[in-house]
Image (tube, rainbow, N blue to C red):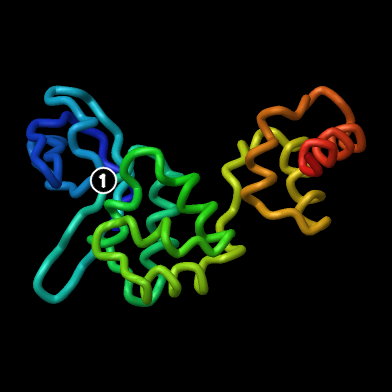
C-alpha cells in the first residue's frame, strides 16, 4: 500500500495525471487534473484500489482530502470513481455541511449520486466527520470539544472558529463563541 508519491508530473489528461518517480510513471486518478502542471514536482497522497482485474491509484493534494475520500468510499454504494469528483473544487465544506444538515439535494448535484446514495451518505457519515482544526492549536481543539458537548453542530462550530481570539482563556473563548452562535 502506498501513502504518497513524490515526483514530477509528466502527463496531464482529463481524468488523471502521470507522475514520474525514479523512472517509473504512475498513472494517478485525481479530482482536478488541470490543477497540476507538466514538469511540476508534486507530492500526491495515494489511495490504492486493488481488484481482481485492476490496480488503480487515486491521488489527493493533501491528507485531509484523502481522509474525506476514505470516509466517502466507506459508504455502501459509493465507490472511488463516484467519490473522487466530489472532491473537486471547494466542495469539501459543502459536503460536510450537507451531511451534517441532511441536505440531500446538495449531494445529488454530483455525478452519479442519486437519491438513494445521497441518503446513504448522510446515514453513514452524519456526526462522523471531524472538523479540520490544526492539531497544534490546543485552545481551538478544546473550544471545539466544549461546543460539541453543548450540542452545537460541527458545521456551525467550524464557521465561527476563524473569528475566535486564541490568546484569551478557554472560558472567554466559549463566551465569545456562544455570542456568535446565538446570532
**Residue 44 x/y as whole percent:** 29, 39
- Does residue 43 lie above or below 156 as drawn? above
Identify the image quadrant of the C terminus. top right
Report the side of 95 relative to 58 (left or right): right
Identified at 25% across, 64% down, the residue is: 112
Report the side of 179 relative to 53 (left or right): right
- Among all residues in the image, which is located at the extreme right? 171
Identified at 8% across, 40% down, the residue is: 13
- Count of all numbered marks drawn on residues in the image: 1
- Does residue 80 lie above or below 130 as drawn? below
The answer to which image quadrant residue 137 occupies is top right
**Residue 115 x/y as whole percent:** 37, 72
Identified at 9% across, 73% down, the residue is: 53
Identified at 84% across, 33% down, the residue is: 176
Q: Residues within 10 Å of mark 1 (few under 14, many from 20)?
A: many
Report the side of 132 relative to 35 (left or right): right
Tag 1 secondary structure: loop
- Does residue 2 lie above or below 119 as drawn? above
Instruction: Please give the residue where the numbered disc 1 appears in the rendered image.
Output: 31
Given residues 57 and 14, the one toward you in this image is 14
**Residue 71 x/y as whole percent:** 44, 62
The answer to which image quadrant residue 149 occupies is bottom right
**Residue 162 x/y as whole percent:** 66, 30
Identify the image quadrant of the N terminus. bottom left
Amino acid at each position: 500500500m502506498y501513502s504518497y508519491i513524490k515526483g514530477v508530473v509528466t502527463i496531464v489528461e482529463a481524468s488523471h495525471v502521470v507522475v514520474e518517480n525514479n523512472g517509473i510513471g504512475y498513472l494517478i486518478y485525481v479530482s482536478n487534473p488541470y490543477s497540476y502542471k507538466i514538469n511540476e514536482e508534486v507530492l500526491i497522497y495515494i489511495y490504492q484500489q486493488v481488484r481482481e482485474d485492476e490496480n488503480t491509484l487515486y491521488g489527493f493534494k493533501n491528507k485531509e482530502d484523502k481522509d474525506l475520500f476514505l470516509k466517502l468510499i466507506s459508504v455502501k454504494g459509493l465507490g472511488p470513481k463516484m467519490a473522487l469528483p466530489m472532491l473537486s473544487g471547494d466542495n469539501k465544506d459543502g459536503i460536510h455541511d450537507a451531511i451534517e444538515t441532511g441536505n440531500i439535494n446538495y449531494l445529488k448535484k454530483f455525478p452519479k449520486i442519486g437519491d438513494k446514495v445521497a441518503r446513504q451518505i448522510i446515514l453513514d457519515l452524519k456526526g462522523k466527520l471531524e472538523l479540520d482544526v490544526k492539531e497544534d492549536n490546543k485552545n481551538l481543539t478544546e473550544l471545539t470539544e466544549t461546543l460539541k458537548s453543548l450540542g452545537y453542530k460541527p458545521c456551525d462550530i467550524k464557521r465561527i472558529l476563524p473569528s475566535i481570539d486564541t490568546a484569551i482563556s478557554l472560558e472567554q473563548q466559549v463566551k465569545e463563541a456562544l455570542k456568535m452562535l446565538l446570532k
